[in-house]
Image: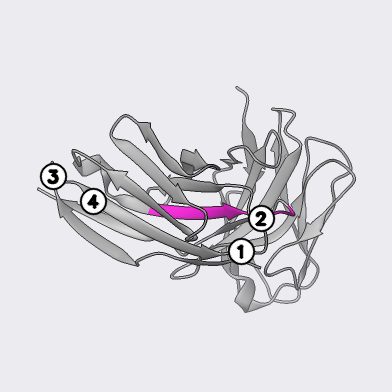
């Protein structure tokens, strides 16, 4: 099965940078996803990493190290609308998509 | 508009009753998933299906059953609801097993 850990909460100031770490242990690995979820809404896809390295998409970047079982999501130039929960999810060899408990990011003015 | 639809949006259910949560997608996605989301526990996988005709158990399958008779529909059934099944239920689909999953808007279920 999977064991996925990420911090519960983070707070940052508008315009700043925040890095959300995710560590995982899994029986087989087929990729790691990051999702954003605003309160009361469904999760929406942010990024996918299957190979080691950094994937950049505008203000958001995601990094993966498979040997360390580690990923991070980097949010740059924070905006108030970035206040949300960020979910790390791991796809196992048998194609189960399992999620961590999520990190709630609060952006302050 | 293409997408994934869940019904009902919310429901209050008496304990012991049977309930089916509906999930339909029109994107011809092969993989479909059911999750429950509880405060502090995140999304937990209940059941999944990689293609029509096949299903698998997730982390918390007890008390739930699913079927996948065709590509579009993936209903979740609670045979005899209990209060611990009070949760927000999300259905998701993806084109293949290793691509991004798209989520429905969720069903808020309260078992009393």
Q: State whether residue A39 appears in this view.
A: no
Cα gap from disc 1 to disc 2, whole angstroms? 7 Å
Residue under label 1: A26
Q: Magenta span covers which residues?
A: A86-94
Q: Main secondary structure of the magenta part?
A: strand
Q: Dot 4 falls on which chain? A: A
Left or right: B53 in relation to B106: right
> Which element is circle 4 on?
strand
Q: Dot 1 falls on which chain? A: A
Magenta-drawn stretch contains A87: yes
Pair 1/3: label in front: 1
Identify the residue at horizontal 84%, vertical 46% (top origin).
B68
Residue under label 3: A14
Pair 4/3: label in front: 4
Left or right: B59 in relation to A23: right
Question: Residue A61, percent across and down?
Answer: 35, 39
Cα gap from disc 1 to disc 3, whole angstroms? 35 Å
Q: Dot 3 falls on which chain? A: A
Q: Picture quarter containing residue A62?
A: top left
Q: Picture quarter containing residue B103?
A: top right
Identify the residue at horizontal 27%, vertical 43% (top origin).
A75
Magenta-drawn stretch contains A41: no
Q: Which mark is residue A92?
A: 2
Mark 4 neighbour class, 10 Å CA radius: few under 14, some 14 to 19, many 20 or more: some
């Amino acid at each position: 099965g999977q064991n996925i850990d990420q911090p519960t909460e983070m707070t940052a100031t508008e315009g700043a940078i925040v890095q959300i770490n995710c560590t995982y242990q899994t029986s087989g690995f087929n990729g790691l996803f990051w999702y954003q979820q605003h309160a009361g809404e469904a999760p929406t896809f942010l990024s996918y990493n299957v190979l080691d390295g950094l994937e950049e998409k505008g203000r958001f970047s995601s990094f993966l190290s498979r040997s360390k079982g580690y990923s991070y999501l980097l949010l740059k130039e924070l905006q108030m609308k970035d206040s949300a929960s960020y979910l790390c999810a791991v796809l196992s060899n048998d194609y189960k998509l399992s999620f961590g408990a999520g990190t709630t990011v609060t952006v302050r003015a | 508009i293409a997408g994934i639809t869940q019904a009902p949006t919310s429901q209050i259910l008496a304990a012991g009753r049977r309930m089916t949560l509906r999930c339909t997608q029109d994107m011809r996605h092969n993989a479909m998933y059911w999750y429950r989301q509880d405060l502090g526990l995140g999304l937990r996988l209940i059941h999944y299906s990689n293609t029509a005709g096949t299903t698998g158990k997730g982390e918390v399958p007890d008390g739930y059953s699913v079927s996948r008779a065709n590509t579009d529909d993936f209903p979740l059934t609670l045979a005899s609801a209990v209060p611990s099944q009070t949760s927000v239920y999300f259905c998701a689909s993806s084109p293949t097993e290793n691509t991004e999953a798209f989520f429905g808007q969720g069903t808020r279920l309260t078992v009393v």
